[in-house]
Amino acid sequence: MVLAALVMFISKGVANRKASAALALAVETKKANVSIELAPTDTFVVKSMTLSNGLPISGNIKAASNAVVKAKVAGELRGLTVREGDFVKEGQLLATIDTTEFLARQNQAQKTADAAKAQVDIAQKNFNNNKSLVEQNFISKNALDTSQATLDGANANYAAALAGVDVTKKSLDDAKVLAPISGTLSVRNTQPGERVGIDARIVEIVDLSRLELEATLAPSDSVVVRVGQTATLAVEGTSTALRARVVRINPSATAGSRSVLVYLALDNPAGLRQGLYAQGLLATTKIDSIAVPIEAVRYDKPAPYVQVIENQKVVHKTVALGARGTASGMEYVAAQGLVSGAIVLQGNVGAVREGIAVVLPSAKALPAKVN
């Protein structure tokens, strides 16, 4: 009985070992047959590209051209119908200031000028008569000089009166509130019927066709910035990266902070508004190198590596990382150890076991190569 039990125990152990071996073989076979199907956005085709290195910049977007329309004369505001968001053209009549007082002043100045002209006519006649009498030796030369001085004084008074008429005409012209630039009304400071004083703000106009980013740079960073350099910006509220170009550099540092203001003109600013916040990278140097997206590099091994697809399988390939930069609005890092044309997995795929089979998307669905 003991011998029979021992034989049964040994037989059972052998059967269990065979079952475990079969199960392990089945698991390994299943693992070997597992494959991952990739989407077009899961892969990146490696090639040499130009990476832009530079300075991080940020600031508020401002209109390159804006105007605050102020009252040039005091009076009651009339005819102001434009409101915030309305587009106005340069020279367009926005409102008028009551001209009753200015018309009265013009009439008064004109009457004064007419009276001065009458005095000129009288003085001219006296001068002509005295000149004739002097020629006939009926009066002395002193009388002629006196009439000449009277005539000159009358002419001066008349010229002053005419200048007064011009002043009143200027006041009438200033009573017209005109748009100095073409643009969109951003602020309306007064209401129709309100009495405004000289230099009172009436409306503010911004030209949204030309927008600029006003960025503040540290003194050490500003020395490498040049007019014409480009930047890639992300503007709040938008998902599309925008390009900008340095158009001006302030020649003076800001008092206190010693920072330097740099102005970048935005390409295709349609749809943007003044005051939005933007940030990005200003390209100061450029390098040509084999590069991969920063997210594609993994660091869960002693050395950084990327997941490369070779012969329809995933291979972990160690890379030596170099300079970082941007291209087409994306961030890349130079990677030595890869060849142009290699296909790497993007960072969104996550960690994939080395050797696992993959199903690539069709050639038409592969992501476009980055220039």
Image: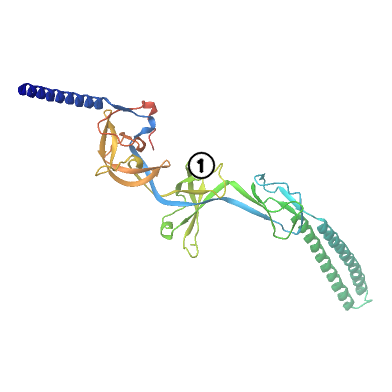
Circle 1 is placed at which residue position?
A: 238
Placement of the N terminus among the 4 image quadrants:
top left
Q: Nearer the viewer, residue 123 or 369?
A: 369
Residue 238's spot in the image, x, y percent? 51, 42
Identify the residue shown where x is 87% and y is 76%.
146
Identify the residue shown where x is 36% and y is 36%.
348
Question: Quadrant of residue 123 in the image?
Answer: bottom right
Placement of the C terminus among the 4 image quadrants:
top left
User: Along the horizontal axis of the image, is 70 left or right of 240?
Assistant: right
Question: Quadrant of residue 162 in the image?
Answer: bottom right
Q: Nearer the viewer, residue 194 or 241?
A: 194
Residue 316's spot in the image, x, y percent? 26, 36
Residue 166's spot in the image, x, y percent? 78, 60
User: Residue pushed farthest left?
Assistant: 3
Give the vertical position of 310 relative to 174 (above or below). above
User: Along the horizontal axis of the image, is 362 left or right of 200?
Assistant: left
Q: Nearer the viewer, residue 299 or 83?
A: 299
Graded by Cα atoms within 10 Å as few (under 14), some (14 to 19) or many (20 or more), the crowding at tag 1 reads few
Question: Quadrant of residue 131 in the image?
Answer: bottom right
Q: Nearer the viewer, residue 334 or 33?
A: 33
Amino acid type, residue under disc 1 in the picture: Thr
Identify the residue shown where x is 48% and y is 56%.
216
Q: Secondary structure at mark 1?
A: loop
Give the vertical position of 85 relative to 354 (above or below). below
